[in-house]
Amino acid sequence: MALIVQKYGGSSVGNLDRIHHVAQKILQTKQQGHDVVVVVSAMYGETDRLIQLANALTHYPDPREFDVLISTGEQVSMALLSMALNAKQCPARSFTGSQIGIHTDTIHTKARIQKVNTDIIERELKQGRIVIIAGFQGVNEYGDITTLGRGGSDTTAVAIAAAIKAHECQIYTDVDGVYTTDPHLIPEARLLPQISFEEMLEMASLGAKVLQMRSVELASKHNMPIRVLSTFSDGQGTLVTFEDKIMHKLPVSGIAFSREEAVISLSGIPRQLGTEGRILAKVSQAHIEIDMIAQNMTAQNTVDFTFTVHRREYPKALKIIEELAKELGAVSVKTNPKVAKLSLVGIGMRSHTGVASTMFQSLGDAGVNIQMITTSEIKISVVVDEAHLEQGVRAVHQAFELDKIPMETQQLYIE
Ligand code: ADP
Ligand code: ASP
Ligand code: MG
């Protein structure tokens, strides 16, 4: 008998038929003799709908009220799922984050979980009931509802799994597991039987929304294995675990991408000590996060300073940079608000050379222009025109033969 946390995402509980199907899966797990704690997301599209409502009402919704509003989607799905289980004679009870005691800091819309109370969960399990908990939400020290950022139900599931010392945290979604890249963009993408926490963290932070980044951080901190599985088909899914448990380290594991980027470039800035610091200080004072930075000298002994921001921040960042351009005596401000970031991730990059050259060559051969580059130990990211993103992902996927099962990992697929 094991203690298992199962999380079902928005598309898994998207309508009543699906809720019945999820209830059936939970019942099966229970009938196998396991204790089950379930975390649910809002029904598909519901959180977006609530956000649109708030934004239609006011440009600056009060953050406390905004969290009260957008946390309601999960309360609907948890109750429906509990009703479906009870109707199948499987005793279940649903709880909000606040009822359970998922304590967070006070930062509305991106709160961090600080502590999880396990009393109610333990009491309910002892009574033989399935415990269903609303994902994505918690309560702060003032008793106000907080939310954990988009995709935050993954983090709720991992936090609960760690607190109750579950054997495994299973994340059920609409794809079979973690793939070499988003299978909705590249159908040839291959399911990965295993991936390291470190690689998954990079993939998630670089745009692969299959797991929220904080859930991976938390799982690695608490040594909690995550298994990503499909709600709609059987299979072993993907195990996210420690690097030393990965049987074969390939040079490259996957490609992540994000379409939500924008580039701003200050050109022809007369050289002056401290210019970079001044630019960054102004942008960060406005709470805008800069992602990539590139700087080059021109033949005229001036400097071109280029950076990327999330597209949502672009208008605000542009306004600041236009003002700064005058102060610094820059020649012009150039922008491209429609770029994307494509990133190649793999722990094997540490020991394999030539990964960057293969990547850049494949992009060049596919006619994809690279606008910026950054690298770290296990990733290479490039900025490309958004219109060329799909072409670029496909070219890099093919160049590294990510669609083919590598010889040395074949037995993992048979198991
Ligand atoms: P849920 O509602 O179940 O939380 P999400 O939409 O948040 O589901 O995450 C699952 C989606 O993540 C998939 O439908 C897929 O389009 C996307 N995705 C992006 N990159 C990957 C990847 N490398 N592997 C699997 N899915 C990915
Ligand atoms: N419902 C929330 C969202 O759409 C949380 C989640 O689905 O994980 O972001
Ligand atoms: Mg999600």
Image (tube, rainbow, N blue to C red):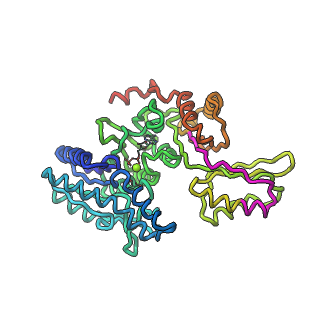
Left-right relation of 37 to 285? left
- Residue 37 seen in render: yes
Farthest residue, direction left: 89
Quarter of the image where one finds residue 156: bottom left
Quarter of the image where one finds residue 410: top left
- Residue 1 seen in render: no
* Vertical position of residue 108 compared to residue 341: above or below: below
Residue placed most toward the observer, 149 or 386: 386
Quarter of the image where one finds residue 72: bottom left
Which stretch appears magenta?
Answer: 322-343
List x then y, in percent, for residue 398. Answer: 53, 28
Farthest residue, direction bottom: 142
* Vertical position of residue 245 compared to residue 81: above or below: above
Residue drawn at x 41%, y 66% as measured from the top left: 67
* Vertical position of residue 355 compared to residue 171: above or below: above
Q: Is residue 342 magenta?
A: yes
Residue placed most toward the observer, 194 or 157: 157
Task: Tell me how many marks there are.
Answer: 0
Residue drawn at x 82%, y 47% as measured from the top left: 298
Which quadrant of the rendered structure holds the C terminus?
Answer: top left
Q: Is residue 388 magenta?
A: no
List x then y, in percent, for residue 344. Answer: 56, 38
List x then y, in percent, for residue 365. Answer: 64, 27
Residue drawn at x 59%, y 58% as measured from the top left: 313
